[in-house]
Image: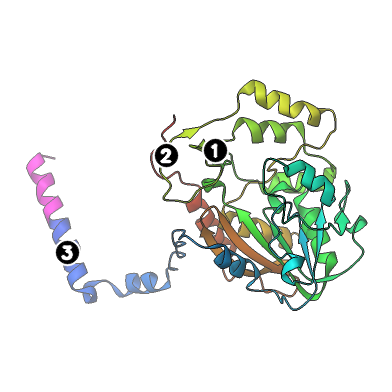
């Protein structure tokens, strides 16, 4: 076929396409029906705006009843709901008040550290806490847990009927986990079945070897500009992981999420019968974190599994140029 004939065919095809756009009535009826039945693509989350501390607290607590009795897990040096501000809340952490003061002395302000009501031991939270609560707050806690499933099961067991767990969760695209792979469902299930009490040597290696900063920032937002750099060497990562290899607890980000990936993961765990909590509310990423509220009485996400898969896949795409210092 000659180039002249090819060009003519292209012009004819383009002309027909243009007429269909201008005159939708020319589209065959069967095709119009298919187009009407085609599902609309899921919405794309809005870009993260900036927020104040009060905005953040409002987002985290928007779907829980603060008039009830609450539990804040792992507030360390900066509780969201301090007893000093009048909240009827109990604190659970891995160190008592004196231990937290010693840990953060010279590193962070310690004036806000309050009495710890439940010092958590290795194992299940329910072994350390016998009370029940109207709500549980966990800000940047879930990603640290040794077993994600056990953590969520224990939170449900600690809630009174109608109670809710509210979470602030780091979006790995905007924090030092930027170059880590997101958590796979298979690993979540395998860890639950194995029932470890400390993080594995491999988890500690991965956390430290892939840790990245932008300038001196460990967390940032979508519009942050700067050069990435890895603060830890291979030797640093190996040294950090050595205690874990001997069975000692080393604190790391054990689980890595983006917002819709996390929603999908939690929905899958519910449908597999591994957890009883379902999504009550969700808010997309602001700065370096997103927000979820879970409850045993909640209906779950208002999206199909396929829609969550599509949205999670979009979040896996790398955006922007990578510049290293």
Q: Residue at x 73, y 64 (%)?
A: 82
Circle 3 residue: 18
Residue sitting nearer the eye, 134 or 270? 134
Q: Is residue 149 left or right of residue 288?
A: right
Figure quadrant of the C terminus: top left
**Residue hosting label 1:** 179
Residue 169 in view: yes
Specify the segment rendered in magenta. Answer: 1-11
The first of marks 3 and 2 along the sequence is 3
Q: Name the main secondary structure of what is drawn in magenta.
A: helix
Q: Earlier in the sequence, mark 2 or mark 1?
A: 1
Q: Tell me the residue that label 2 is attached to.
A: 226
Work out whether residue 266 or residue 272 is closer to the camera in this orientation and state it.
Answer: 266
Disc 2 versus disc 1: distance between alpha carbons? 16 Å
Q: Earlier in the sequence, mark 1 or mark 3?
A: 3
Disc 2 element: loop
Q: How far separated are the C-alphas under marks 1 and 3?
A: 44 Å
Between 185 and 70, the one nearer to me in the picture: 70
């Amino acid at each position: 076929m000659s180039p002249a004939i090819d060009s003519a065919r292209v012009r004819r095809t383009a002309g027909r396409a243009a007429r269909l756009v201008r005159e939708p009535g020319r589209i065959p009826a069967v095709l119009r029906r298919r187009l009407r039945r085609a599902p609309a693509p899921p919405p794309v989350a809005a870009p993260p705006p900036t927020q104040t501390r009060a905005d953040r607290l409002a987002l985290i607590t928007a779907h829980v009843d603060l008039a009830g009795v609450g539990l804040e897990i792992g507030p360390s040096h900066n509780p969201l709901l301090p007893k000093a501000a009048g909240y009827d809340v109990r604190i659970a952490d891995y160190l008592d008040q004196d231990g937290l003061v010693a840990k953060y002395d010279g590193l962070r302000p310690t004036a806000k550290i309050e009495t710890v009501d439940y010092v958590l031991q290795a194992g299940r939270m329910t072994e350390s806490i016998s009370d029940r609560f109207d709500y549980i707050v966990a800000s940047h806690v879930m990603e640290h847990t040794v077993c994600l499933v056990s953590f969520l099961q224990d939170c449900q067991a600690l809630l009174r009927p109608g109670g809710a767990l509210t979470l602030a969760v780091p979006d790995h695209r905007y924090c030092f986990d930027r170059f880590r792979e997101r958590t796979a469902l298979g690993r979540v299930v395998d860890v639950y079945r194995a029932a470890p009490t400390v993080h594995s040597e491999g988890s500690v290696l991965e956390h430290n070897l892939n840790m990245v900063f932008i300038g001196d920032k460990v967390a940032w937002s979508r519009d942050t500009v700067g050069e990435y750099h890895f603060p830890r060497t291979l030797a640093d990562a190996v040294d950090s992981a050595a205690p874990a290899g001997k069975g000692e607890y080393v604190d790391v980000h054990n689980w890595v999420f983006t917002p819709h990936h996390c929603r999908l993961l939690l929905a899958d765990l519910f449908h597999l019968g591994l957890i009883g909590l379902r999504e009550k509310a969700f808010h997309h990423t602001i700065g370096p974190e997103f927000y979820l509220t879970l409850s045993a009485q909640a209906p779950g996400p208002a999206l199909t599994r396929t829609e969550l898969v599509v949205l999670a896949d979009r979040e896996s795409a790398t955006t922007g140029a990578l510049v290293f210092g």
